[in-house]
Amino acid sequence: MKTEIIPATEIEKALAVLRNGGIVAFPTDTVYGVGALAFDNLAIESIYAAKRRPIEKAIPVLIGAVEDFDKVAIDVPKMAYIFAERFWPGALTCVVPKNEALPPAISATATVAVRIPNHRAALNLLRMAGPMAVTSANISGQPSPITAQEVYEQLQGRIPLILDGGKTPGGIASTLIDCTGATPTLLREGPISLEVLLSVL
């Protein structure tokens, strides 16, 4: 497979790859991610293959607008909507009950992790493509890439397309919060503290 790098503004080409069952790497507000359309099970399985990612590790879903929450989740808790309105787009990932329409390759559990990234190129793609299953664009266990070239060095020949949006901020992964209980549970520390989250409820 030939891996092509194109400017992040050439979204139509990325959409064509995605709609044809392919996967695409693109920049986010943390690192470069590699993703597939969230309802394409075979394409999501190819993310695991390209990354050599253990199949038991769930893949988060990125969306382009809060309105898309209901496409990938059901019975979304009120606290998740409060967090979404306050912190999205941004470095907060909410774990919520999964819409059963999502394919099994995304998660073997009854939940799904959802986020809106704070990056123009990512948002442009997500708003045109719809919800996407996205994880870091690296070989599992290797450093997460912050440039298109770093993606190419790891995934050359394993994915068809990389959108080059320049260097990403990199750094710390998003805060991961479980919103399925009576109170939020911190699953991974990140830029937004549990204290700040509790203060907006």
Image: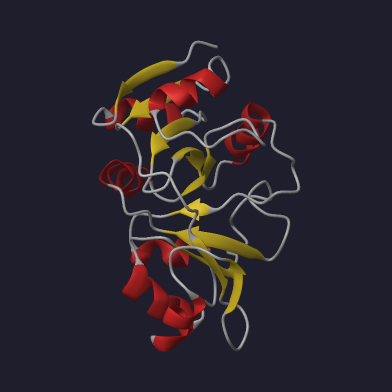
Query: In this view of the protein, can residue 201 be seen by the observer?
Result: no
Disc count in the image? 0
Q: Residue at x 76, y 48 (%)?
A: 56
The one of 69 and 95 positioned closer to us in this rendering: 95
Q: Nearer the viewer, residue 141 or 50?
A: 141
The structure residue drawn at horizontal position 60% and vertical position 39%, both measured from the top left corner, is 44
What is the quadrant of the N terminus in the image?
Answer: top right
Q: Provide residue 64's location: percent of width, then percent of height.
A: 34, 54
Return the x and y of residue 119 as percentages of the image width and height: 30, 48
Q: As displayed, is residue 110 above or below residue 24? A: below
- Which quadrant holds the C terminus? bottom left
Q: Quadrant of residue 102?
A: bottom right
In the orientation shown, which residue stands out farthest toward the front? 171
From where the camera sits, is residue 10 visible? yes
Front position in the image: 152 or 131: 152
| Depicted 51 relative to depicted 78: above or below | above
Single out the residue that lies furthest toward the top: 2
The structure residue drawn at horizontal position 62% and vertical position 30%, both measured from the top left corner, is 139
Q: How is the image coloured?
A: secondary structure
Instruction: Decide if residue 73 is on the left or right side of residue 117.
Output: right
Residue 182, horizontal then vertical, whole percent: 60, 89
Residue 102 against residue 196 in the figure, above or below: above
- Please tell me which residue lies in front, 28 or 85: 28
- Give left or right: position of 154 versus 162: right
Residue 82 image offset from top left, x and y in percent: 39, 80
Residue 24 left/right relative to 42 = left
